[in-house]
Amino acid sequence: MFKNKSILITGGTGSFGKTMLNFLIKKELKEIIIYSRDEMKQWLLKESLSQVKNIKFVIGDVRDEQRLSSSMKNVDYVIHAAATKIVPTAEKNPEECIKTNIFGALNVIKASLDNKVKKVIALSTDKASSPVNLYGATKLCSDKLFISKYYENSFTKFSVVRYGNVLGSRGSIIPLFLSLKKKNIFPLTHNDMTRFFLSLDEAVKFVYFCFNKMLGGEIFIKKLPSILIKDLIHVISSKPKINIIGLREGEKIHEQMIGIDDALYTAEFKEHYEILPDLLFKKKKIKLFKGKHVKKNFYYSSNNTLKIKKNYLINEILKIEKNLLEEKS
């Protein structure tokens, strides 16, 4: 579906953006636009891909609607990956988090509508389900803004992709734990802490899948394994010393993808769930999506899902270790 099309990625120099870019290079697109505010990351990425001719780098912030709109001219698809993501940072700098995650989302929506973009996917987070921190609350607002466009029957179709922690991404806990491997002393906020995990490649492939499947108005949620963080530490070190340091501001013990209230509007598929607009259920159109309605008391948290396989985790950690060494060299 991407052949001879143009796509813009906000936050395109982040971990997801770079992996998606490497994926899209093989799809024969007319143009890939990397939109971000970090000029150094753009420069380094541009230098590493100097042989690829259909990539355009644009310095810009999602807070700047005019810049976004001018950058989206003749764009077919948009992936909105830009966000303020670090939970403690958002708690201490709430205005900045709101400006990027909420007002930035509004700007992406308006620019997409003004330029008649065909499809837009916004990346979300497990923290947007029943949020207890500002980051999660702003991403819930962002999700609602994108999904609300379903009711306006606009030319542009908007959907959301929600997933958990990405292995090896910026801010991921694994690079931190690897840096502490020699000292063999690891901080842990709570003994029962669990998290969803997926690889960057899995995240990219799921977004591609959703572009092909989306009709507009869905929140796509990949079925993911989870892990006890203390078990993750034991994979990295056989006999670790673990210091329990207490929960950080706005931190949950177990993350959640789908709350009980959202289950009323959730359809289940083989490898993912979709939270659908309520109108689809009121009009009994769920069969159009070829999914089955989940149970009313269903909720999807990192405490009640399949545990991640140890061999898979070891292989991913080895990849991350290799990438970190290459970056240092």
Image (cartoon, grey):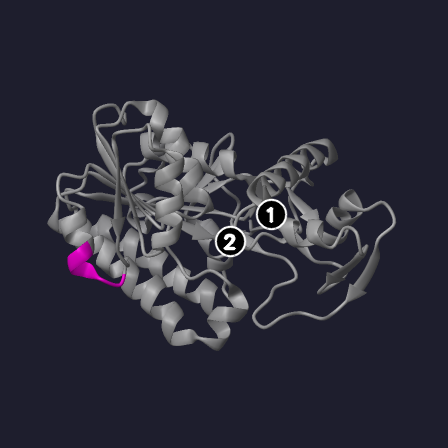
Look at mark 1 in the image and give the residue it sits on: 196
Q: Amino acid at mark 2?
A: Asp
Residue range of the region highlighted in magenta in the rendering = 63-67
Residues 57 and 282: in front is 57
Q: Quadrant of the N terminus?
A: top left
Q: Residues within 10 Å of mark 1 (few under 14, many from 20)?
A: many
> Going by the image, does 281 lie left or right of 90?
left
Residue at the far front: name it: 329
Q: Position of residue 245 (x, y in %)?
A: 74, 70
Q: Amino acid at mark 1?
A: Phe
Q: Residue at x 33, y 34 (%)?
A: 211
Compare marks 1 and 2 and give the one earlier in the sequence.
2
Q: Based on the picture, tell me whether residue 83 belongs to the magenta stretch.
A: no
Q: Where residue 14 sits in the image (x, y, percent)?
A: 43, 48
Mark seen at residue 126: 2
Q: Is residue 156 visible?
A: yes
